Image (tube, rainbow, N blue to C red):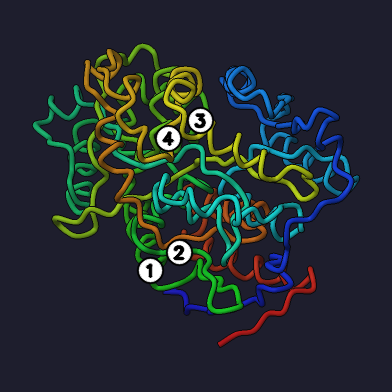
Amino acid sequence: MRKRIRRTVATAGVLGLGLAAIAGCGGGESKEGDGKASITFWGWAPGYADAVKAFNAAHPDIEVTYQEVQPGAKGGYQKMLNAVKAGNAPCLAQVGYETLPSFAAQGALQNVAKYANDDKGDFQEAAWKSVTLGENVYAAPVDTGPMALFYNKELFDSLGLEPPTTWEEYRAAAKKIHASDPDRFISSPYLDYDYAGLAWQAGAPWFGIDGDAWEVSLASEANEKVAGYWQGLVDDGLISDAPMYDQSWYTGIGRGEIATVVGAVWQAGVIKGGAKDASGKWAVAPMPQWTEGGDEVGNAGGSSTAVLKDCESPEAAWEFAHWMSTDREVFGTLVEKASLFPAATSLLDLPALTSGDPYFGGQKIYEVFAEAAPRVNTDWTWGPVMTKTTADLNDGLGKAWAGKGTISDALGTAQDKTVTALEKQGMQVSSR
């Protein structure tokens, strides 16, 4: 087991927690002559343009202009940060929860707590925590990624297996599935945020804020427990070598060679779209637990509508961001077009979330996720250099899943390199 290294990074310089509502020159984000607030919103999710159109029709005092950009990891985030540096950024931008602290660390966000705090109760606790740092609120939660177990029910039934309720049962099922056919595996490798969801459920955070400091804990004892479990499955030859989202992965799902996917709600659309031949064979069950009778759930994914640094109409920006996340009709469209699962507690009974899905044998799969959502472990904070952290982690995880290292080593190396990256940015780092 790798010895735990606990290092902290002073928060004040990292996140700019002293950021107040900054009113600078911000890309035409202003009040028009007739008093109408004019704001621009950059995003990429299907359905966002429809939401903006509906908002403008119902809110004559605010005019929102939507501009589609590339998804964040494909260039959208860099475009946003470049615009902030140039002083011509939009008021609002779609930013994933995992990336929000990185934007804050670069001074790219505006604190809108004075407009947003009254709406805190509208959102699931874990989602709200994902858009706040200290006393600051930087965004409105949009969707979440509560996790569950997608499993090939036809295969499980043929082997007399029930969906596992604990990770111990999951291991037993893995052995029986592989024994039935050497080409069958319980799962495939998990990387970056998909793997993070597994740690999240286990109460094994990667980062935390301790007073005025950051704590980096990828190599903690709790994370070693998760790593050791999955390493055991790898060592026993129970994990497929098909990379997640690769064509071989979709093929394996379609043929019954990959029996489960431990994933977020949005994986339903991924599986349906990539393995159409398996329609009617799959089902969804609650996420296996570390202890019998437990109810902890991990989260993978989810995004927010963030208020960027120089927005001159932050109150109007928050009004739109909150509205898009809580309006029933508009969010119903987002469910249908983008498979988003609402962060707002009042939307969990949307009609689009209560109907049966033919792909999953007519099962009302969103009911599983609706029950899971309020059980998402709230003890999770994303770090300030997640692009660097996940790149280093994926390098190690890729080797570990292939038997050329261990998951524990991957976590330890990612932790060390994350701390080094923080030091290089001039952040105060201490060990204890």
Q: Which residue is mark 1?
A: 222
Q: CA distance from mark 3 to mark 4?
A: 24 Å
Element at label 4: loop
| Amino acid type, residue under disc 1 in the picture | Ala
Q: Residue at x 58, y 67 (%)?
A: 415
Percent across and percent down for residue 59 are 62, 25
Percent across and percent down for residue 393 are 58, 56
Foreground of the two, 327 or 199: 327
Q: Which residue is mark 3?
A: 245
Work out whether 12 lies above or below 43. Answer: below
- Relative side of 420 to 374, left or right: right
Q: Are marks 2 and 1 in contact (CB under 8 Å)?
A: yes
| Amino acid type, residue under disc 2 in the picture | Pro
Q: Earlier in the sequence, mark 4 or mark 2?
A: 2
Q: CA distance from mark 2 to mark 1?
A: 8 Å
| Amino acid type, residue under disc 4 in the picture | Pro
Q: Earlier in the sequence, mark 4 or mark 1?
A: 1
Q: Nearer the viewer, mark 2 or mark 1?
A: 2
Percent across and percent down for residue 202 are 34, 60
Q: Which residue is mark 4?
A: 342
Q: Classify 10 Å Cα crowding around label 1: few (below 14), some (14-19), many (20 and above).
A: some
Q: Nearer the viewer, mark 1 or mark 3?
A: 1
Element at label 1: helix
Q: Where residue 205 is drawn, which disc sits there?
A: 2
